[in-house]
Image: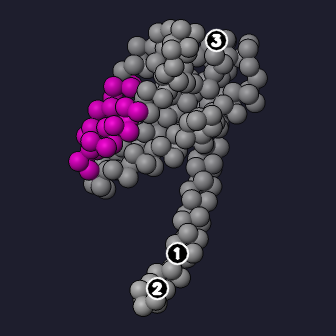
Amino acid sequence: MFALQRNRPMLRAIPIAISICLVASTRSFADDAATLESWQSSFHDVWQSDQCATEFESWNKYWGAVHAFYFGGSGYAGWFPDSQKILAHVTDAAANATIAAQLAALGRRVGGEWAKGDGCRSVRTRTSWMEKVAEPGKPALLDWETQLNKAAAADTGNGASIEAAIASINKQLDALGVAAVPA
């Protein structure tokens, strides 16, 4: 009984902590949604410049896939949440800002390509044998997610391992001919 009385202040703090987390995550979601909305014309340019994409999918379908890339779905957490998780490993403030900008640029590049329809895109989603057979030679979004997460886990706080993973993924995108998407 005495232990329970000693922990009452902590028990009272739990709902407050949960409320703070919910407000912070809502604010982050709103910020992310506004950021993505500010990039809409750039993504429209990517969609419009690809004859395959414009022929086989509407702008609304493509834009919906861009949203799914950034906010998640179908077993994928989303680029925005993944980026925040990766950035949490970079404790150096200057390096964090640099890595954040690199992740944002990489996300626009990957997301712009991944959002295209299956027959038009150069990037597949999963690493399953079925997708490897259906879309041979295409790198998988989930492989890149794993690569970035492993780099973040190994990072010493300066962002160097994450930066190397980003460079590696950019090289793969270069080989595929996937252009950068301006902000």
**Rendering coords of residue 57 (x, y %):** 74, 19
Give the mark nearer the N terminus: 1 vs 3.
1
Q: Which residue is mark 1?
A: 14
**Rendering coords of residue 77 (x, y %):** 55, 41
Closer-to-camera residue (158/3): 3
Q: Which residue is mark 3?
A: 119
For numbered disc 3, what is the local secondary structure? loop
Callout 1 touching callout 3 (CB < 8 Å): no
Q: Amino acid at mark 2?
A: Leu
Residue at the spot 38% in from the left edge and 39% down from the top edge: 149
Disc 2 residue crowd, few under 14, some 14–19, many 20+, Cα 10 Å: few
Give the mark nearer the N terminus: 2 vs 3.
2
Q: Is residue 163 magenta?
A: yes
Spatial CA distance of label 1 from label 3 is: 49 Å
For numbered disc 2, what is the local secondary structure? helix
Q: Which residue is mark 2?
A: 4
Q: Is residue 107 magenta?
A: no
